[in-house]
Amino acid sequence: MSTQTSQPAWRVLLGYVRPFRSVLVLGGVLSLATAAAGLALPLVVRELIEGFGSGAEISGLLLVMTLLVLTNAAIGAFGSFLLERTAESVVLAARRQLVSRLLWLRIPALDETEPGDLMSRVSADTTLLREVSTQSLVSAVTSSLTLVATVTMMALLDPVLLLVTLAALGLAQVVLGVVVPRISRAAKVAQESVGTMSAALERALGNLRTVKASTAEQRERDRLHDAALEAWRGGVQAAKWQAVAGNTAGLAIQLSFIVVLGLGGARVVSGAIDVATLVAFLLYLYYLMPPMRELAHVATQYQVGAAAVARIQEVESLPAEPDESAAATAVETTPAAVAFEQVHFRYSADLPEVHHGVTFAIPPGGMTAFVGPSGAGKTTVFSLIERFYEPESGRILIDGTDVHSWSLAELRAAIGYVEQDAPVLSGTLRDNLLFAAPRASDADLDQVLAVTRLEAMISRLPDGLDTVVGHRGVKLSGGERQRVAIARALLRRPRLLLLDEVTSQLDAVNEAALRETIAEAARTTTVLVVAHRLSTVTMADRIVVMDTGQVRAVGTHTELVAADPLYAELATTQLLANTDNGGIAAAESSMP
């Protein structure tokens, strides 16, 4: 994934906080009030010391000090709460924006990325925005103003001691200038390593059965351990430079304190200043430490946040489909016609073409089967109809209209698609069935359950339709998952039904029932099937034979057995491998 960003990190961060600027201003004002209360304390202390020497009444000064301390604590606590709440709101907004982007990503963009790394950007990287987008922004302003005010007060007390202090602070600034860029690089490496580790973990857990069946647990463990080690190294490197930056300011203040104490004592002895002024100056020097530390912390946090922003912007720059769901209107209920005209397509620029001028026309209604060797481009036909991918050239027409003239929402609302692996989502069985048609009635649901022979299975489940099916439907068999996916597509009442190897995991009884279901659906919709079982292919109204990314023949089973050598070979070998003896006998009887 590209590491370039479209705009500077600070501009992006300001964009995140802009909706909360009024709260941030209030938080900044409260922080300044806290700082002002703190700055007043040394002056009160000086008055107290002078009062002790002169024997003046000091109870009023003690009351003022108490009020300043209590006010400081109360305002500081409320201001901190406002900033933390706003920080969480910024993270929420960033996550919502990022999730919305991910769900509308174009499929080719998703093919080029690791899902685990994308999840890391949504969870870990957005979390890093918490401090840098609000607390650090306000702290940068308030700490700078506090620093200026403190230095001003110190200048009024004793310019000589101030020069000594500024010399030490200048040295600290030089050190920070060297360290801060290193923090940026280390933070980027650390966050990329976390993304790599998340991708490796998603890879292992998402295919845990394959891992166990291959006795590959140790190898995957080593892969994850290596990824975790890289994340640890990146984190330690970033922590090292953050520690250097964080303690540089404190060290400068402590050195200043020692020098000022010595030089200030000498100036007291010489009569240049009095003891009360020296104590007040030392207190101001002490008050320099929080804003100095805070500014150093802001600088390091900004580098970490900038690295997070860069990774988030990489996702934002990925090509996405328009969100047209709100503008979608009701589609027709009549069967759809489909045509491909000289379609050329490849999955990426560095891969060979999958389609070499694919051309065919399918009238509305009925069932059309796509057959051919593996890699012929059959499933790609379905992906192009759904506009998961775009052809390099040629046209794809639905009802005589180029698919690019359809809104994506309306196009996909007219299509029911059952993928080859028949995915089932985590959640209840009811959630899965209603996933594509959330407004379907109970009567519609009962009808679809009947035609897909799911009623018996549901009756055996402990909670019926409300049974949780587990991650990827792990609590269902392969055949059950396939029937659930088919029922989900049928419940949508599509004009065009795309079925990719839907009988591959069904037994003979359920396959026969599904053939009846497909035949019934073909009376009211256009059904396209990628199939290898001869029993499914022979019931098609037409068969499209594909080979090496081209359509080589179109016809019925009987016509193609006689006219196309490839189909005749498939009918006696590959197609027969997944059928029963009755199908074999039927095929053999149809052979010339």
Image: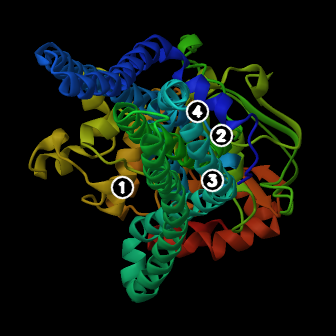
Mark positioned earlier in the residue sequence (4 or 2): 4
How far apart are labels 4 and 2 at the CA level? 48 Å
Q: Residue beneath label 3, please?
A: 176
User: In the depicted view, which residue is nearer to us: 74 or 229?
Assistant: 74
In percent of width and height, residue 6 lies at 76, 36
**Mark 4–mark 3 CB contact (< 8 Å):** no
Cα–Cα span, label 2 and label 1: 30 Å
Q: Secondary structure at mark 4?
A: helix
In this picture, residue 374 sits left or right of residue 24: right
- The residue type indicated by label 2 comes to Gln
Q: Position of residue 322 (x, y in %)?
A: 66, 25
Mark 2 in CB contact with mark 1 (< 8 angstroms): no
For marks 1 and 4, the one nearer the N-term is: 4
What's the residue type where badge 1 is placed? Answer: Arg
Q: Secondary structure at mark 2?
A: helix
State whether residue 585 is above or below residue 502. Answer: below
Residue shown at the point (63%, 53%) measured from the top left: 176
Residue placed under numbered mark 2 in the picture: 313
Q: Secondary structure at mark 1?
A: helix
Left or right of residue 394: residue 403: left
Q: In the displayed structure, does residue 433 sit left or right of residue 523? A: left
Q: Which residue is mark 1?
A: 472
Q: Which residue is mark 4?
A: 159
Q: How is the image coloured?
A: rainbow
Residue 390 coordinates in the image, percent (x, y): 78, 40
